[in-house]
Amino acid sequence: MILDSKTPEGPIKDKWTKHKNDINVVGPANKRNIDIIVVGTGLAGGSASASLAEMGYNVKAFCYQDSPRRAHSIAAQGGINAAKNYQNDGDSIYRLFYDTVKGGDYRAREANVYRLAEVSVNIIDQCVAQGVPFARDYGGLLDNRSFGGVLGF
Ligand SMILES: Cc1cc2nc3c(=O)[nH]c(=O)nc-3n(C[C@H](O)[C@H](O)[C@H](O)COP(=O)(O)OP(=O)(O)OC[C@H]3O[C@@H](n4cnc5c(N)ncnc54)[C@H](O)[C@@H]3O)c2cc1C
């Protein structure tokens, strides 16, 4: 049996961008008529819920804890990798893509990893905007460093 991951066609760096450009969009007036159910309110579910609600969809987020905060997302404190290149040391979307594929023993879906590397840049800003408490340097900027396992570490 061949598992069909339904990865879009085209060159790896264009697949998901092209797919996003090709799919139908929902008109602003119709968004409020669409219910979106999100199960789990960690960083993925919580941020998706907040962003979709901000876009106008009718979001129902479900969690089974008294507070939606008890998620792995609350436990993470080592850092998060993104192709921000704050230190101007050659960090790039391609390098994050390459690192992640290699770090995953070449078993990841490469088109999806490429998309992850691409959106990593904006995801940090989205997290900040939605209240994720990242470490800061004394000047108030996001703290960052070469991370274990990445090229150039
Ligand atoms: C101790 C620890 C340290 C980590 N450190 C790092 C790090 O430094 N850097 C890094 O990048 N990653 C780290 N990770 C991994 C990272 O935290 C996770 O990959 C990421 O937080 C997953 O986010 P998520 O929103 O997908 O899932 P989660 O944060 O796990 O959220 C899923 C939520 O769904 C809920 N849920 C599940 N099933 C149901 C259901 N049926 N109904 C309702 N709710 C449900 C869960 O209770 C939970 O609240 C760490 C993980 C752990 C555990």
Image: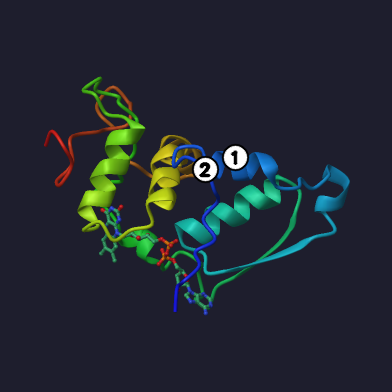
Query: Does 41 sit left or right of 153 as displayed?
Result: right
Name the residue at 43% across, 49% down.
Answer: 111
Q: Residue 62: which numbered mark, if any?
A: none
The kind of secondary structure element at disc 1 is helix
Q: Nearer the viewer, residue 99 or 36?
A: 99
Residue 132 shows in the view: no
Q: Residue 10: which numbered mark, if any?
A: 2
- Residue 87 picture quarter: top left
User: Is residue 114 placed above or below 49 in the rendered structure?
Assistant: above
* Amino acid, disc 2: Gly
Q: Would the CB of label 1 be found within 8 Å of ligand 1?
A: no
- Residue 60 picture quarter: bottom right
User: Is residue 140 placed above or below 115 in the rendered structure?
Assistant: above
Query: Does 26 sit left or right of 115 as displayed?
Result: right
Name the residue at 31% across, 61% down.
Answer: 75
* Amino acid, disc 1: Lys
Q: Residue 44: where, in percent of width, then height?
A: 49, 57
Closer mark to the observer between disc 1 and disc 2: 2
Is there CB contact under 8 Å for labels 1 and 2?
A: yes
Residue 55 shows in the view: yes
User: Is residue 134 placed above or below 86 in the rendered structure?
Assistant: below
Q: Residue 119: where, in percent of width, then height?
A: 46, 40
Residue at the front extreme of this rendering: 1
Q: Residue 18: which numbered mark, if any?
A: 1
